[in-house]
Every structure is written in structure tokens, then in C-alpha cells.
Image (cartoon, helix red, strand yellow):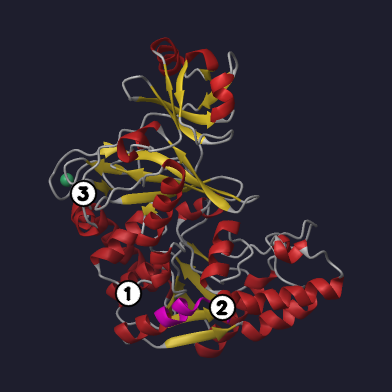
Amino acid sequence: MRSPLSSRGMLWWCDACHTPVLSRECSSCGATTRRVMLTPPGDARPAFPGDVALVNRVYSSHFGSPLVPDGHLALLNKVPDTDRMEEVIVGGGVVGAIRFVPEQGFWEAIPRREAFGLLAPARKFVVVDEGAAAVISGNSASVLAPGLVEIEPSVRAGDEVFVLDRKGECIAVGRARVDAGDARSMERGMVVRTRRTSPSACIPGEATWDDAVAANAGPIAEHEEEAIAFSRDAAKAHRLPVNVSYSGGKDSLATLLLARKALGDVPILFADTGLEFPETYENVGKVAEEFGLPVVRAEGSEAFWESFAVNGPPARDFRWCCRVAKLQPVDRVIRDTWGECLSFIGQRKYESARRMASSRVWRNPHIPAQVSAAPIHHWTALHVWLYLFREKAPYNRLYEEGIDRIGCFMCPSSDLAVIRHVISRYPGLWEGWDAKLKEWQQARGLPESWVETAGWRVRGESREEDRHR
Ligand SMILES: [Zn+2]
């Protein structure tokens, strides 16, 4: 696939150290590393304890056994899907995925063959005879009733299953077409539609993230050096007061560390929409204190609610929120504080197709007083995380809980999977937002489902779309 987003080849694995590596050679043991083929955009990130718990919960509830073994490093790679789907990388192989099914509101396990060696399923498998096994493993054929030897009794139509031969080896994965009870009495017809996946060798072994930092010492040092040089050049070229745009997210934290190394202490510019997570406010305070940096705050809350009263909630296709609650307040505070400034921003090209095409220094038309520069433009999420781990940087606790994008808690661009998580984790925070949605829904005579199924997130009419950067 020749997508500009394709970063195939960006990730390798050291089978001696059992860690991901961002180059062809392991910095720790010197071994030649093995490529890991990810689905583009391929911006893989560490699976934090909250992520591992989710993956293991999803696999355990379906197959009766967790996917990620204790003590092993795992990565997640977000892939395109209707709502949310994450590839799971263990032992240098893509061993499966978890996918959020918005209609039913749950995560499903979608294993690859390589998962079998990690989890030894207690449930959800079928066994086929020698003849069928040869055809299935050779031609990715479906499992047909005549070749079926055994079907685990809990299998239901629509279930993901492992297909085993009589020796108990996994020869395929796929989706059951019928219930176990019906399959037993069938004489012909399809029992499991198998799924073709590219092989992705999984060689499991225990390691820590400190091991991963050591295995990546070379590429991380190179990226750091380049980003520092870029930051110094940008400061020299523009000769403006410098600050770092800090959101409480990992990318802006890495940018802050780099800017300090390049230019010494610089103020933090924080766009406070009033809709941040409590952990984000805590993190901004902690970072400012730990590094002894002044915080220049752009307040957007008042403007947000004024606009809400007129426009209703922001939506994916009606994102007035960024301009109103972030960009305009930032422009105002920059003019009041510095007149004009150079801001270092934690923007990365691997975040999206649009960012892939964006430049490394730019002016946002909504913030004419600001020149923006992105020292970590070429970094993947894994570069950022390994750098933060190496620096023992105070990153936002939200990441450990499975929230991988730090922004407004009710962002209309969030997946339903994330919104469900926020509702259960922050009931009080969500209640306030929910009440505002209901007010608008009732005043406008909109159906209740507009609130209940998060229909407010899409207007479905052609409206202005804010292209915030
Ligand atoms: Zn190694």
C-alpha cells in the first residue's frame, strides 16, 4: 500500500532483548532487529497497564485466557475502523486486535493465528480433520461441516474462533457462521469463515520499558539532537519571544523537554478550555512546578459556553470549539503578553494524513501573532514515549488508564469507545455536560437518542469545519 502515511519499516523488534526498536540494530545488545509490519499509519504506542488490562479482559471473557502474558511488553497500534480498533503487538508480532462494536457497546477480540501460542484458548475453537486441515491451511478455505471433528459448545454464530487440527495446532482463525449445537447436526455448509492474515512472527519473552529505552538509546539520542538543533535554528531565524504550547499531553511534554535543552527555561502556554480532565490540570501544575516555569494561561471557558448558547454543542462536522475556546484566546493572550511569539508545538506528522502533509514551521490563520514550530514533527509515538521514559518525565496519569489522546473530556471527535470510558470513569464530569446537552435537545425538540447515543457528535449538515492545527 503506497499511502503517504505508510510507516512500514518504522518499527523493529530485538528478539534477544524482547523489546521494540526504532532502528535496524539494537542499541543494547547490538543484534540485528526484525521488522514488525504494522497497519498504516503505524503510530504504535506502549500498552500501559490500563490498556493491557482491557486487552486481557476482552480476550479472557471470550477465549477464557488473557492475550498479553505477565512481564511482556505490548504495543497498541490504532487502525482505521468504524469506531475504534487497536492492533496488539506482543513478541514482535501483531497477534490480534481489539475492536469496539458501537452498536452493542462492547470490545471484541479479533485474534490472529499468532495469538494461539500466547493464550491457549479454553473456549471458542473448532477442530477439523486432516483433509480439511490441509485445504484450510493451504488455501485459506472455510471450515465446512463435513471436515468438522469438534466444536467447542459455547461457540455461537458470529463468534471469533481458532481453527485447530487434530494435533491441537492452530491452522487458522475466523468467524463462526453457526451455533455449536447447529453445527453438530449439519451435513453440509459453512461452519467458520476463515480470515487471511499476513504472518507476523511472535517470539515472546519478558522485558521492561527500561530495557526498551536501552535498546533504543541510539535512535532516541539522534532524534533528540536533531530536534534540539531544529529548535535553536527556529529561535535564531525568528528572533521572537519563545514559549512552549503545553496541553498536558505526551507530545507537548517531549517538546517542552527539548525546548528547555535547546534554549533554557521557557514559559508554558496553556490553552485552558475549562473542559480538560482533572489529571490534565494536575499535570500542568506539576510540570510547571517541577521545571520552575511560568504558565501563561489562555482562558477559553467563557467563550465556549457563550458559543454553546448560540450554536449548541460542537460536532465533528461543526467544530467551532477549537477556534472559539482555544485559538482565539491563545491569540489574545499572545498579543497581550508578547505582542508576537514563537511557540514550540508537539505536533507530529504520524498523527494523521493531514499532519503528514503539514510543514514543520507555520502560521495558523486564527493565531496571526504566533509562529509555530514542531521539533518532534518526524517522531512516532514510540519515539516520544521512549524519550519520556528515558527522561523520567512527569507525564499525564491519564495515559496509564487507557486514554491516549489528551484533550477536552467531551471532544466530539472522540471515539464512542472513549466516551463510554469517560462516562464510567468521570460520572460527575459527564453529568454536567449531559445536562447541557439535554437542555439543548429539549429546547430544540430533538429526539432523546440525540443525547443517549451521542448523536450530537455529528450534525450531518454541511457546516463550517474548523481546521485547527
Ligand atoms: Zn537487543
Check disc 1 and give the amino acid type: Pro
Q: Secondary structure at mark 2?
A: loop
Circle 2: is it few (<14), some (14-19), or many (20+) Cα within 10 Å?
many
Circle 1: is it few (<14), some (14-19), or many (20+) Cα within 10 Å?
some
Above or below 1: residue 164: above
Image quadrant where residue 118 sits: top left
* Image location (x, y in percent) of residue 147: 48, 14
* Image location (x, y in percent) of residue 196: 47, 26
Write down the residue under mark 2.
Answer: 369
Image quadrant where residue 438 sits: bottom right
Q: Quadrant of ligand 1?
A: top left
Q: Secondary structure at mark 1?
A: loop
* Image location (x, y in percent) of residue 444: 85, 71
Write down the residue under mark 3.
Answer: 206
| Residue at the spot 78% in from the left edge and 77% down from the top edge | 439
Comes first in the chain, label 2 or label 1: 2
Check disc 3 and give the amino acid type: Glu
| Residue at the spot 57% in from the left edge and 31% down from the top edge | 179
* Front position in the image: 395 or 182: 182
Write down the residue under mark 1.
Answer: 394
Q: Given this view, does label 2 or label 1 mark the residue nearer the observer? A: 1
Is residue 274 on the magenta stretch? yes
